[in-house]
Each structure stands twice: as structure tokens, then as C-alpha cells.
């Protein structure tokens, strides 16, 4: 099969990723090239292809365009075997096993909490993030959209809290379109650049959603 090329110029998020997903679902190409015209799409498409087992090379095509070539690996990553954990499961209580299935998602759309005084709202957000570790293993994912992406930028007082949560096992997803809008793509210092497909899927999979 000849190499497939997808022209995703001028497509808003998450259309470039959705086009890639549709192509992979329908044709399972050994390799493909995706042309995008913004940093957010470049990061999102590269991350998506990587999660699907493709080795990705990015080429600056000039004029604000990037060509992403994905080549399928010879051997897909094997899925984890639940039996590997059986020895641990045998000594866990029923409550602990139940909690293992909890997927709490924290959904942030601002870098402050509440309305009335942004200085106070910023302090409340720092206190909120500093307290999230108390949730323990139930905290599954933190999703940041709109003004909340400022929390992930270099120099943000929230960085130590977010990095601590990420190191503890929580996934931090930062909207690429929002970063691009605020001119913060290069300043992102924590988390993974994400797209609306990831956001919607995360909301669907979460067992509980917290929005302060």
C-alpha cells in the first residue's frame, strides 16, 4: 500500500487527530504522513500516533507547515496482564479493590477559583492544588482548558503542586488549542499537550468529575 498523506491544514482541534484516528481505524497503514499548520496540532497528532504504536518523525516544511511521518512498529506493545497483579490482589481488602477502579477527574477551566476577587481566587486555586494529594490513588487525571492552562506555564506558582501530582501518578492534560491561544505552547512546563478528543474521552471514562 502506498504511503498515505493527510492534509490537515486549517482544521480546528480535534479534527487533525480525528482524521488520523479514522485513517488508522479504516486502513491500518504501515506508514502515513500528516501535514499540519500549527504547534498544537503538531504536538497532538504526534502524541496520538505514538500512543498507537507509530514512530513519529517531524519535519519543518516551511511556511508554518509541519510534516509528521508515522511508521508502525514491527511489534505492538503488549497489553498488561491482569494476572501479573493477582498476588497483590489476594492481600487487598474489598474496599481497596473498589477504590482501584475509581477514576476521579479534576476539570479546570480557570487559573482562579470563584468570582469577585482574582487575587483571592488565585490563592484558593493554589490551596486547592496543594490539597489534591489527600485524594490519594483515586485522583486519576487533571484536565486544564481555557485560562487554566496558565497554571502549567513556566513561572506559575502552581507548577510545584502539579509536578508533585504528576510524579504521584496523576495524568495532567493541557489543552493545546488553549496554550496556542495564549501564546504559551513553548512555556508549558508540566503535563501533556492534549486535544478535545482526549478531553471528551477522559470525561467519559471518569467515574467522578470535580470542577472547583
Image (tube, rainbow, N blue to C red):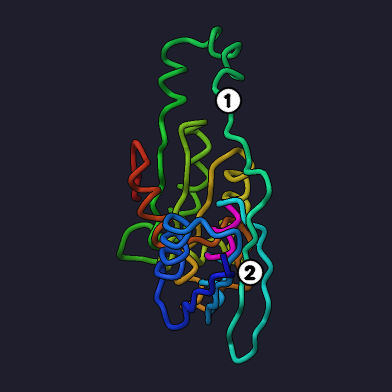
Residue that carries the numbered disc 2 in the rendered image: 69
State whether the magenta stretch is mostly helix, strand or loop.
helix
- x%, y% of residue 190? 61, 57
**Which residues lie in the magenta part?**
45-51
Please determine whether, in this image, residue 97 is positioned above or below residue 32: above
Q: Residue at x 67, y 72 (%)?
A: 58
Q: Earlier in the sequence, mark 1 or mark 2?
A: 2
Nearer-the-camera pick, 19 or 197: 19
Outermost residue toward the top? 91
Badge 1: few (under 14), some or many (20 or more) residues near its Cα, within 10 Å?
few
- x%, y% of residue 136? 51, 31
Nearer-the-camera pick, 52 or 112: 52
Residue that carries the numbered disc 1 in the rendered image: 81
Q: Secondary structure at mark 1?
A: loop
- x%, y% of residue 189? 63, 62
Inter-mark Cα distance, 1 to 2? 31 Å
Location of residue 3 by image quarter: bottom right
Tally the numbered discs: 2
Q: Residue at x 37, y 41 (%)?
A: 205
Please determine whether, in this image, residue 100 is positioned above or below residue 212: above
Amino acid at each position: 500500500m502506498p504511503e498515505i498523506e493527510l492534509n490537515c491544514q486549517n482544521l480546528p482541534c480535534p479534527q487533525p487527530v480525528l482524521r488520523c484516528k479514522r485513517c488508522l481505524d479504516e486502513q491500518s497503514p504501515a506508514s502515513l504522513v500528516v501535514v499540519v499548520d500549527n504547534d498544537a496540532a503538531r504536538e497532538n497528532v504526534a502524541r496520538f500516533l505514538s500512543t498507537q504504536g507509530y514512530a513519529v518523525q517531524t519535519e519543518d516544511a516551511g511556511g508554518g507547515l509541519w510534516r509528521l511521518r508515522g511508521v508502525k512498529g514491527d511489534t505492538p506493545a503488549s497489553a498488561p496482564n491482569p494476572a501479573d497483579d493477582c498476588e497483590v490482589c489476594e492481600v487487598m481488602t474489598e474496599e481497596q479493590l473498589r477504590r482501584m477502579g475509581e477514576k476521579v477527574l479534576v476539570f479546570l477551566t480557570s487559573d482562579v477559583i470563584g468570582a469577585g476577587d482574582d487575587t483571592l481566587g488565585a490563592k484558593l486555586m493554589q490551596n486547592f492544588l496543594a490539597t489534591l494529594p489527600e485524594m490519594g490513588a483515586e485522583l486519576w487525571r487533571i484536565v486544564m482548558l481555557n485560562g487554566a492552562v496558565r497554571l502549567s506555564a513556566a513561572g506559575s506558582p502552581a507548577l510545584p503542586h502539579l509536578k508533585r501530582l504528576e510524579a504521584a501518578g496523576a495524568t495532567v492534560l493541557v489543552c493545546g488549542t488553549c496554550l496556542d491561544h495564549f501564546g504559551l505552547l513553548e512555556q508549558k512546563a508540566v503535563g501533556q499537550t492534549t486535544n478535545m478528543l482526549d478531553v471528551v474521552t477522559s470525561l467519559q471514562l471518569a467515574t467522578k468529575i470535580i470542577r472547583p
